[in-house]
Amino acid sequence: MKLAFWTVTKGAGNIAREYKEKLKEHLKDYEIDVFTLKKYDIENTSQIDDFTNNINEKFSQYDGHIFIK
């Protein structure tokens, strides 16, 4: 199964990255991606330029989504 975190602020990106690490301990069969805006340069995340275009492009590739503002 695939899970995506989508964030639009630096703080939310850091929180999502931490949640990913915690969830990986319990959801070993899940592939978890964290999407952050490139301007925040958050390590170990998929950095994107355009939130709306990326969501439209990738939404159907995931089984679940978590949005953090």
Image (cartoon, helix red, strand yellow):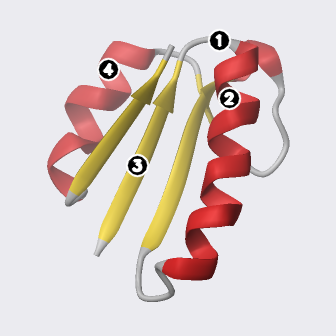
Q: Earlier in the sequence, mark 4 or mark 2?
A: 2
Disc 2, disc 1: CB below 8 Å? yes
3, above or below 34, in the image: below
Q: Residue furthest left?
A: 60
CA gap, disc 3 and disc 2: 12 Å
* Left or right for 21, reference 31: right
> Which of the two marks, 1 or 4, is nearer to us in this view?
1
Disc 4, disc 2: CB below 8 Å? no
Q: Secondary structure at mark 2?
A: helix
Which residue position is annotated with label 1?
9
Q: Earlier in the sequence, mark 3 or mark 1?
A: 3
- Nearest to the observer: residue 24 or residue 60: 24
At x 40%, y 49%, the residue is: 4
What amino acid is labelled 4 in the image? Asn
Q: Residues within 10 Å of mark 4 (few under 14, many from 20)?
A: few
The answer to whether residue 34 shows anywhere in this view is yes
Which residue position is annotated with label 2?
13
The answer to whether residue 45 shows anywhere in this view is no
At x 78%, y 51%, the residue is: 44
Q: Residues within 10 Å of mark 2 (few under 14, many from 20)?
A: many
Which residue position is annotated with label 3?
4
